[in-house]
Image: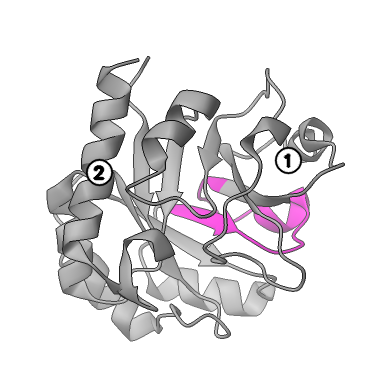
Amino acid sequence: MPAVRSKICGITRIEDALAAVAAGADAIGLVFYAKSPRAVTVHQARAIIAALPPFVTTVGLFVNASRCELGEILDAVPLDLLQFHGDETAADCEGWHRPYIKALRVKAGDDIAAACDAYPSASGILLDTYVEGVPGGTGEAFDWSLIPPGLRKPIILAGGLTPDNVAQAIARVRPYAVDVSGGVEQGKGIKDHARIHAFMQAVRSSTATM
């Protein structure tokens, strides 16, 4: 099995970003959604990105942002990849001269394949847990058996992942990547460096044994 990529999301501090990179994370996520306890300002985001070494993907997370707001942030912050976590259509996600991934919140009865196909220009699809009124970051896992085989896009698995269950998740889903936020925190937006290390160790170990 190819190596499973990883993103540590909800980064708010330089030291947490550097800890994620040191542990082997491929990407860090910066949340531009004011209602999130993990939201960052443009100033914070620029400082975090400036501190990163090469070859680390910077991902900006947005939830139903206006084109004006999104444009202003992209003019100010050098993001590599966009992650849309709201009700955005494919047209809303396109036209920013950057690749994007679309997050889908999974619940029983959803036609996940059809939902994925609605975003043909996406670089990948992130599958997260559906909780009424919450766009993400719930810390709750969903039933991985709901994911149908043969999806056409690379799948990023999110939702309630922790150092204790990520190996099981990888064995079950075989995703392209895993995405964690609350599962490696000591508090909202404050990462626990030991948990980041444990999470990344579990990702590497699970891939090596597949």
Q: Is residue 17 visible?
A: yes
Give the structural element (helix, strand or loop) at label 1. Answer: loop
Looking at the image, which residue is at 35% across and 15% down?
A: 210
75 left or right of 210?
A: right
From which residue to which does the magenta span run? 81-100
- Whether residue 107 is in magenta: the answer is no
The residue pinned by badge 2 equals: 200
Q: Farthest residue to the front: give it.
A: 164
- In percent of width and height, residue 196 lies at 24, 55
Looking at the rendered structure, the kind of residue marked 2 is Met
Quadrant showing the N terminus: top left
Query: Are the residues tagged 1 and 2 within 8 Å (C-beta)?
Result: no
Q: Secondary structure at mark 2?
A: helix
Q: Nearer the viewer, residue 65 or 10?
A: 10
Residue drawn at the location 62% of the way across and 29% of the way down: 153
Residue 53 locus on image (x, y percent): 13, 54
Q: Which residue is mark 1?
A: 119
**Alpha carbon of mark 1 to alpha carbon of mark 2: how far?**
29 Å
What amino acid type is highlighted by mark number 1? Tyr
